Every structure is written in structure tokens, then in C-alpha cells.
Image: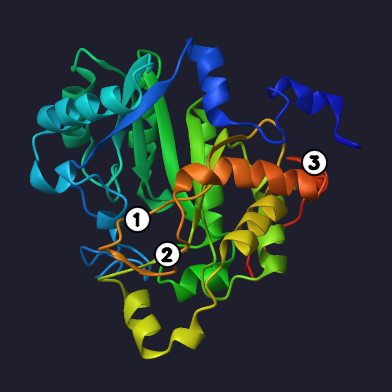
Amino acid sequence: MSNFPESMARFNGRRYHVYNDWIKLEHGGRLQKVSIDAGFTCPNRDGSLGVGGCTFCNNEGFSPSYLREERDITVQINTGITFMRRRYPRTKGFLAYFQSYSNTYDGLDKLKKIYAVALAHPDISGIVIGTRPDCLPEEILDYLAELSTRTMVELEIGIESCNDEVLRECLRGHDFACTQDAIRRAAKRGLFITGHLLLGLPLETSESLINGARALAELPLDALKFHQLQIMRGTRLANQYRAAPESLALLDPRSYLDAVIDVLEHLPPQFKIQRLGSEVPPNVLVSPDWGMRLSKFPALFEARLLERNTWQGRLFAGSTAGHCGNNNQ
């Protein structure tokens, strides 16, 4: 482990800050997220900004099957907990994970009622809310801040890319400045904030990805999730791929892991890393088929970090971090 800094040894000797390790230390054991589909939509689907969603979006690819079969939140939680207890028998507790679409995109009174149903479940010890940066008005952030004084609250914000050209190409409907603003406003209220990044989007380059990492390093984030671009059925990207496969330069496992590492090197060591990738059901996936399960990623990632003799924060520049490429700020 030549040149590996002693300061990283506090992360169980790992070369990056693993979210689950932190959770176990902070909360005395593993907390498992139980996915919920509360029937929300998104301004990029209901006509407010657009219809059909972002070019890559098909929530079915990331949602458990029971979410498509059952709308009652309590029943969803019961089903999810039963599954999680079989899969992770040592789980200490469960978090209600509002995952599908934009889970702050409604009136505050309705949101309060929906969240309350989940938090009333005797086995739920906190709440995780996935949403877009343009769906976080002040009154909702104020409520989440108040709620966080009574229970664990994690706000998961879809960043996807820090490059405005990439965001426009995938019809995201907002720019990176909107993301920066949302994260800063949420952080001022003391909320735990996880950002979601999607690597391999059209027009993203190695340079813009690293510029984006430097910009993220300047933000008051607590954690990050990395996902690779996967072409899923029923999306605009699937139509593009079928018409012209060569127009989409999809990442292979090695190039993807290297892209994650390129970002990781520029991030502060205190950012927790929740996910290294994702997988979707074979019946939804169009491409790429890597022929491996996501569970293999951590070992491959650790091995690649060792090969490159690098670690999270190796190139972190602190306050000298720049802004994202191709942004008009």
C-alpha cells in the first residue's frame, strides 16, 4: 500500500469511505432500506417540464417487483421487510425508502400524510426520500428539517451529471446550478444529503467528469451513489440505441470502475460512498450486459484502487476545486 495515507486507515483500512461501515459505527448495526412506491410522478413526466421523463429513465428497472403490484404503503413495507430479513438476517433496523420518481413533488400536506404512514410502522426507524433538485421548495425543506429532529432523515438528490450540456442532452429539465442551490439549501437545515451520479451519459467526457468531481467536492454533501448508464426498455435511449448503437459509447466494467475512481480521487475523504453501481432485471435491460452481479463490484473496485495505487481524496484540492465543464454559471 505504497503512499497510502495513514489518515485513510480509519476507514477500516479501505481506500474509500464505505457508507455501510459508517452506518454500523453510527447506529450500532446495519440499517436496510425498504423501497416504497407512493405513486409520485415528476415534473419531467406530468407536462410541467416535459413528458416521457429523462432519456434514460425507467424506474421499473430499479424497483422491486412488489412495488408494481401493491400501492398500500404499509403492505409494501411489510413485504420489503420480510424479504430483507431473509437476505440480511443481521439487519439492525429498517429505513423507509421513497425511491420511485420525485418523492417531494406534491403539496406539503399530502407529503406529511404519506411520510407519516411509513414512519408509523413499528419496524421503521427513519426515512430516505429520493427526489430531484428542482422539487425542493423552502417549505418542504423546512418540514424535513423539523422531521429530522424526531427521526433519521436522508435526502437523496438526483445529480446525474454536473455538465449542463449532458443534462440538456438527456432532457433533464434543470441545470447544475439548480443542483448546487438545492444541496446548499438542504445542508443549511442540517439534513443528511446523498447525491446520485450516473456515469456514461451521452456527451460526458473524462474531462467533464473530473471537473464535475471537483465541483461536487465544494458542496456540503454527506454521501454519493454511483450508477453506470444502462439502456432500459421503454426509454428514449433505448430507441436511440436500436436505431444507431454506435451513437452510444457504453462503458465496460473496467472503464466504468476507472471512471468511478477518477471521480473518487477528487472527492473529500469524508464523503461516504453508498453504491458503486447498479443492476436491472434482464427483462428490462437492453445493454450493456456485463455478465456479472453487482455484488462483485466492491472486490473489483478495491483491487483496481490497489492496482492504481490510489484512494478517495488523493487529488482532492479543497477550496481550489473548479466548476463543471460546459456550464454557464
Which residue is pictured at 68% across the width and 36% down the height? 16
Is 262 positioned to the left or the right of 75 in the image?
right
**Badge nearest the viewer, 3 or 2:** 2
Residue type at the position of mark 3: Gly
Considering the image in quadrants, where does the C terminus appear? bottom right
Quarter of the image for residue 113 reads top left
Q: Separation of disc 3 and disc 2 at Cα?
A: 32 Å
Nearer to the camera, 48 or 223 = 223
Question: Which tag, 3 or 2, sits closer to the chain's start?
Answer: 2
* Residue 109 horizontal/vertical position (percent): 18, 33
Tag 3 secondary structure: helix
Which residue was labeled with disc 3? 318
Please say whether residue 252 is visible from this viewpoint: yes
Which residue was labeled with disc 1? 280
Marks 3 and 2 in Cβ contact (< 8 Å): no
Please say whether residue 145 is visible from this viewpoint: no
Marks 2 and 1 in Cβ contact (< 8 Å): yes
* Residue 296 horizontal/vertical position (percent): 52, 45
Tag 1 secondary structure: loop
Which residue was labeled with disc 2? 230
Question: Which tag, 3 or 1, sits closer to the chain's start?
Answer: 1
Nearer to the camera, 29 or 204 = 29
Quarter of the image for residue 147 reads top left
Image disc number at residue 327:
none
Considering the image in quadrants, where does the N terminus appear? top right
Tag 2 secondary structure: loop
Residue type at the position of mark 1: Val
